[in-house]
Amino acid sequence: MNFGTQKHLPLQGAENRSEVAVLFNIRNGFIMEEKNSKQIRKTGRKPKNDPAVHRYSINLNAEENAKFLALFDQSGISVKAHFITACIFQKTVKTVKIDMNAVEYHAGLTKFFSQFRGIATNYNQIVRLLNANFSEKKASAYLYKLEKQTAKMKELLLKVLILTDRFEKQYLHKE
């Protein structure tokens, strides 16, 4: 096709319409690239360097699933996929075993020592009341009985301390 003289062509230097379209697209492409380079926005989640995109599926029977869940619970890991990869690639998997006897023993000791604090408070109040309300002879007689009970309580406390030391050596391996 002939468009006439060179002055009347849409883009100077183009011989036909297809060349005009190519030149027009090239010019617009440069303009679009300039606009895109100015408007780059950092939105969304950053892509991972090494995303985990390979997935595998396994089937377990009831017994195997129970064993798997028991091992998973003992490990303390919160994500099953992390637990499975740790097992496959033989990374060390920490297992935390909670001994309910140890928990009960600790709870009992806590109650025991809180009771000792209560007894000590009551002991002080009793001694004050005896000295304030009774004669010296009666107060000393009651205090003698109180001292005997205190000595028994001291023996019990020493036994508790010995048992606690034995328990710590046996169950709480401190490094």
Image: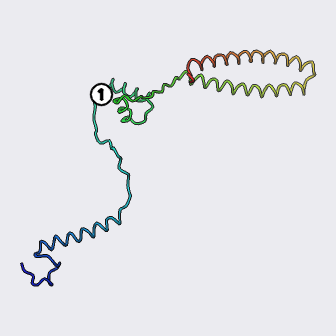
**Which quarter of the figure has residue 1?**
bottom left
Residue 72 position in % (x across, y down): 40, 29
Q: Which residue is mark 1?
A: 60
Q: Looking at the image, which is closer to me, 85 or 130?
A: 85
Seen as rendered, the residue at the extreme left is 1
Q: Looking at the image, which is closer to me, 36 or 99?
A: 36
Residue 94 position in % (x across, y down): 45, 28
- Left/right placement of residue 111 relative to residue 86 reads right
In the image, is residue 35 above or below residue 10? above
Q: Looking at the image, which is closer to me, 26 or 171?
A: 26
For the C terminus, the quadrant is top right
Which residue is rendered at x = 65% and y = 26% of the image? 111
Residue 102 position in % (x across, y down): 56, 22
- Left/right placement of residue 161 relative to residue 72 reads right
Three-letter amino acid code at disc 1? Leu
In the image, is residue 83 above or below residue 136? below
- The crowd level at tag 1 (other Cα within 10 Å; few <14, some 14-19, many 20+) is few
Which residue is rendered at x = 26% and y = 68% of the image? 30
**Which quarter of the figure has residue 158?**
top right
Residue 3 position in % (x across, y down): 9, 81
Which residue is rendered at x = 28% and y = 35% of the image? 56
- Left/right placement of residue 32 relative to residue 118 reads left
